Amino acid sequence: MPEQKMPVLETRKLGISFGGLKAVSDFNIKIFPGELVGLIGPNGAGKTSVFNLLTGVYPPTEGTVILDGKPLNGKKTYQFVEAGVARTFQNIRLFKQMSVIENVKAACTKDIEYGLFAATFRTPKFWKAEKAVTEKAMRLLEICGLADVSELPAASLPYGRQRKLEIARALATDMKILLLDEPAAGMNPTETAELLACIQTIREQFGIAILLIEHDMSLVMNICERIQVIDYGQTIASGTPSEIAANKRVIAAYLGE
Amino acid sequence: MKKNKTARGYFLNTAVIVLLFTAFQILTAAKGSQGAFKLVLVPSIWQCCYLMVLAASLNLVLGFMGQLSLGHCGFMAIGAYTAALLSLACERAEWFDGKNDPRFLAVLIISVLAAGLLAALFSLLVGIPALRLKGDYLAIITLGFGMIIINIINNLPFCGQDGLALGSAGASLYKNGLGFGSKAKVQFLWFALAVTILSLTLLFMFVRSKYGRAIKAIRDDEIAASASGINTSKYKVLTFAYSAFFAGIAGALYACTNATLSTSSFAFTNGGILNSTFVVVMVVLGGMGSLTGSAVAAVIMFLVNYEIKNGQWVSLLPASLSGIFEYPMLVYALVLIIVILFRPKGIFGTYEFSLQNLIPDIRNAIKRHRAAKAEKEEAKANA
């Protein structure tokens, strides 16, 4: 079992309080390379807060996030990304006025090595780096099925494709673990199926770990290998999809007793 | 194929710039001594030059990075005084002898560069704490900075009466240092044009690189930008300094056009054209996110200002109407309101004028126009 390997992402007693309100407490999770883990819970259970803790948007008030054995305490969001955590957002946050390919290229910024001088005077180093980043961006857009719209403004895409673009942008950061915050929210069944196929392709091609927040139960039960359920900021269950589906506390949390 | 297109674009632009530049040189040589050319056109071009650089540099911060800075003329003032004082100091040290001395050109170049560098240095001083703030707060702090700079310059003691005495640089600047008379303005017109072209080019290069993408990402969504691995504070401060560098250079060009310098021309009080709101009006008019738009808007606003001050038609208006022209600031505010009401994106929006894409762009625009018209007619027919 994966327990022998080192987890790519691990949290220990992670928690955050806003004033007197404990939004998340004692959150422990281990995600191993290549795994797809689901995080579910009723509305307001603290799922997005967990994501914000895992990406450094909120500094935790207790506990630690450990990536590849290294604690990330006190780091800023962009440093989390540099370390290898990338995310998408529940309410899509694209760079709306930029073109589709520019969105992806912007996420490559941290890996582009030329400096101000090379950029303003267009040295060969600049052209080489720009060529590499364009190729990389096109490759990612092809994987996500967006190559045909690469020059259009991001805001002009239909909803389902905006979601995919957000995933492509996250992929451009070369992360080790991808956090998807309700990727299927507001999608119709066809779009959800397409998204599912896209996620599968990404797993096969990149071999990365994915943590997924989702309300669409059929999607979660279908693709997740493990599921962790939280309610009122506390973990109430974790296990395989079939275990979760049969768990009494989970059913109680979702449907009431 | 794409690379070829880029190379062709560079070639085309360079060729056209060189052509225009040569044409200008020939024109200057032929007409340099004629009255209207020497006394009206050339000084106007000088003014347009520094306004273009100033507007384009603010556009980098306001249009591309989405941060409202109201202290841009503070950086311009720093640049103007740095260049003026440096050239005056060089003249006193007798490093050059008159404006025909080839060594004067070296002093001129060094003064302009120093002006940019000092402005950039001050922008770091302001930017590092200020850029943690957003929106109104950043606007307030930069506005305050602009005023502080004016007061500091006003109270600088050095250079005495011939140089900079309590905020105003005396007439000796005109004779000995940077300040160009009408003859020198014709003689150095090429320099103003070259500095302007170079500044705009360098701003373009910045925007069309990873830096441009990073700041546009910050403008569109700062949280998503940092979640995409962009160190937002680093890019904000860097861009602020890069922009201030060119504001400083605009200041140096401004110093060249004036016989004397006075801090009041950079303050809000005199209704002149060098206060920071005027620059904001230029950027908004031209289109936030379009450097070519800023350049065009700079010329338009120069003409508006020129007409208000010198236009013959103003005196023909009834007194109740012409009264407003006594207060140019009101006219600029009016221009801003009209732009916001009728074309909130500005003249160019985020479109960049490009020689290479001019014909295809026009063709596309016509096509779109026709399609829209056809659609309207169809809708009418259906109804």
Image: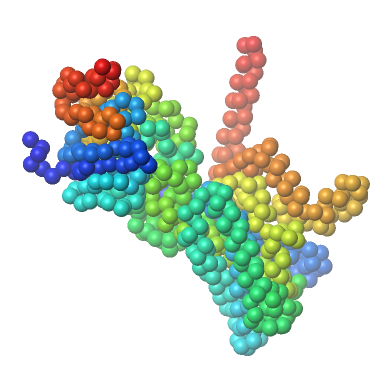
| Quadrant position of residue B359 | top right
Q: Is residue B64 visible?
A: no
Furthest toward the top, the residue is B383
Relative to B96, say whether B193 is above or below: above
Report the front residue among B345 and B334: B334
Q: Residue at x 62, y 11 (%)?
A: B382
Q: How is the image coloured?
A: rainbow
For the C terminus of chain B, which image quadrant?
A: top right
Q: Is residue B248 left or right of residue B316?
A: left
Q: Is residue A205 left or right of residue B53?
A: left
Report the front residue among B266 and B288: B266
Q: Is residue A238 left or right of residue B185?
A: left
Q: Residue at x 39, y 53 (%)?
A: B231
Report the front residue among B347 and B20: B347
Residue B372, image x, y percentages: 61, 25
| Quadrant position of residue A36 | top left
Relative to B32, say whether B343 is above or below: above
Q: Residue at x 44, y 45 (%)?
A: B222
Relative to A20, say whether A75 is above or below: below
Relative to A27, say whether B271 is above or below: below
For the N terminus of chain B, which image quadrant?
A: top left
Q: Residue at x 10, y 37 (%)?
A: A2
Residue A219, image x, y percentages: 26, 23
Q: Is residue A234 visible?
A: yes
Residue B218, image x, y percentages: 46, 47
| Numbered disc total | 0
Q: Is residue A147 left or right of residue A209?
A: right
Residue B86, image x, y percentages: 60, 78
Furthest toward the front, the residue is A20
